[in-house]
Image (spheres, rainbow, N blue to C red):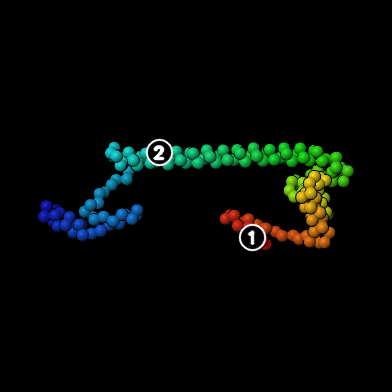
Amino acid sequence: MTLRSLSKALEVFRHVLCGCPCGHVFRMSEGKLVDTRRKDPDDWLGRLRSGRGRLERQCERAHAAYDLIQEGIAIRERRNAERLVARSVRAVMPSFQRLRINTHDVKALFSPVRFIAFDGLRFRNVKRVRLLDVPARSHQQEQVQTSIERSIRNGHVSWATLRVDDGGRVVRE
């Protein structure tokens, strides 16, 4: 290739526009061939790029640590809840025994009633469902208990199956 033909080629390259994936448009004559196998040069851009990579790795480690902390908190809170339930069940266990309720059939709700008993749940054959609560300690609690009892007696009880999808939406089947 002669100097003249190289000069002509470069003149043509000035009129050819190229596009970068980031959206930047440049003339072909302004382009630079880069060997991606080579390490970034030790200039400000190279230092910026390597610093960004270090920062991204640190962020990933921080996110992983955060996830572990959240998981630990969830486990601790679940254990605390289990202890609270066990303590509540032990406190009312004599009542369960008097009512002939197997403690394995009891689930804690705490609100609006303390417990729900699925008689036969342990054997996967529920014969009866009972709502269990302590005597009302306030007028509001008494009103809630009375309204629940009235709803049950009037047959205002129904069954619905709800599913929560991966997006967090609740869908009724």
Image height of 47 relative to 24, above or below: above
| Residue 21 image point, x, y percent | 34, 54
| Residue 2 image point, x, y percent | 12, 53
Q: Are marks 1 and 2 in contact (CB under 8 Å)?
A: no
At a point 28% along the width and 39% down the height, the residue shown is 43
Mark nearer the N terminus (1 vs 2): 2
Residue closest to the eye, 36 or 60: 60
> Label 2 amino acid?
Arg
Tell me if 73 is positioned left or right of 106 in this view.
left
Residue highlighted by disc 2? 54
Most distant residue in the right direction: 98
Image height of 169 relative to 106, above or below: below
Residue highlighted by disc 1? 171
Q: Is residue 48 visible?
A: yes
At a point 72% along the width and 37% down the height, the residue shown is 83
| Residue 138 image point, x, y percent | 78, 46
